[in-house]
Image (cartoon, rainbow, N blue to C red):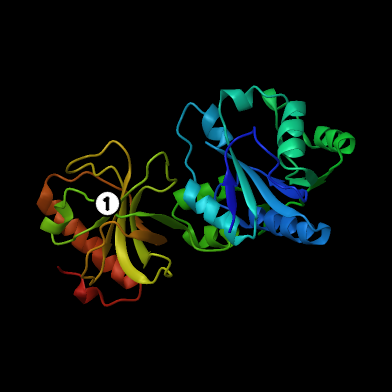
Amino acid sequence: MMRLSRDVAGPCLAPRGSVIAVGAFDGLHRGHQALLARVRERAQVLGCSPVVVSFEPLPRAFFSAEPLPRLSSIREKLKGFAAAGMEHTLLLRFNAALTGMSAETFVQRVLVERLAAREVWVGADFRFGHRRAGDVAMLERLGASSGFAACTMPVVQIDGARVSASRVRALLAAGEFAGAEPLLGRPFVIEGKVEYGNQLGRTLGYPTANIHLPQRVSPLRGIFAVRVGLGESECSWPGVASLGVRPTVNQVSQPLLEVHLFDFEGDLYGRRMGVEFVAKLRDEQKFDGLEPLKAQMAQDSRLARELLGMNPRLAEP
């Protein structure tokens, strides 16, 4: 089982020494997966622990004046690290104290003292330390004097372009799920726990499972054809989903994911759900009352059923 730590200070987490991957790892796309696989392989060769160092909040989000859309929640990211075979995650709190730490101090306190680094693997554009003063060349120099090797992971390309979180975000925002899937190495899924809502969908004939996205801005907005998985099961149950602020009735301040599962009977409250986005149907819009909204929901359901290979004649509640 993977262990999780949050603090810079503390005892050494890897007494046998470690091979370390460092990065933000939002979305755990194919480039991230290749880096983690390399770290796991090198740790096996050297007989030490495969470790990942990451940050929450994401560094870009910490410095951004606007909320940063992100591809994965903290929970999803940690699940990905465990699945990749990491023995320990040092998920550092990205705050004023960490941003004020010099590159030299970061290397000594985190990589050397906390993790007993033998190899540190990063991307070619890696920057670290106060005012991003550290780069790969500095990491190599500091590693040579501190007893570890600094290694740069080759860029992973798909369709002639670098795989990156920003590229994935742009594709998802445009509804290009088929284009994003090869970069992620899997379909795009949002996970969460079903919570109580105001049950408006039930009164309209379309009961929904509501998933709040606290402290997470999704790159998606709109109405979608989806497949749903409950618990750890694969996403196979067809449905239609809305991700937005509900502008017509009971508008919310934070985007809410609402999912209607086709032909489903049962209580979903409190259960964990994974929602795979298959196709975007339209943008979110405001309607002049409940009847136009209900008519549009019926149309959305018919289209989603058709896209998911179901019988659209069953769309009426």
Residue 238 placement (x, y as % from top left): 33, 69
Q: Quadrant of the N terminus?
A: bottom right
Specify whether 19 is left or right of 303.
Answer: right
* Residue closest to the eye, 180 or 147: 147
10 Å crowding of disc 1: few (<14), some (14-19), many (20+): some
Q: Is residue 75 left or right of residue 53?
A: left
Q: Quadrant of the C terminus?
A: bottom left
Residue in the picture at 70% in, 28% down:
129
Q: Is residue 186 above or below residue 50?
A: below
Residue at image position (22%, 72%) is 263
Residue at 77% x, 27% y: name it: 104
Between 76 and 251, the one lying in front of the other is 76
Q: Is residue 211 left or right of residue 117?
A: left
Can residue 160 be seen here? The reply is no
Q: Position of residue 133 (x, y in %)?
A: 74, 26
Q: Which residue is mark 1?
A: 195
Relative to residue 128, is residue 234 depicted above or below?
A: below
Image coordinates for residue 78, horizontal then vertical, percent: 54, 51
In the image, is 229 to the left or to the right of 195? right
Residue type at mark 1? Glu
Would you identify the image quadrant in which residue 183 lies? bottom right
Q: Is residue 38 visible?
A: yes
Q: Secondary structure at mark 1?
A: loop
Count every numbered label the image shows and give the total.
1
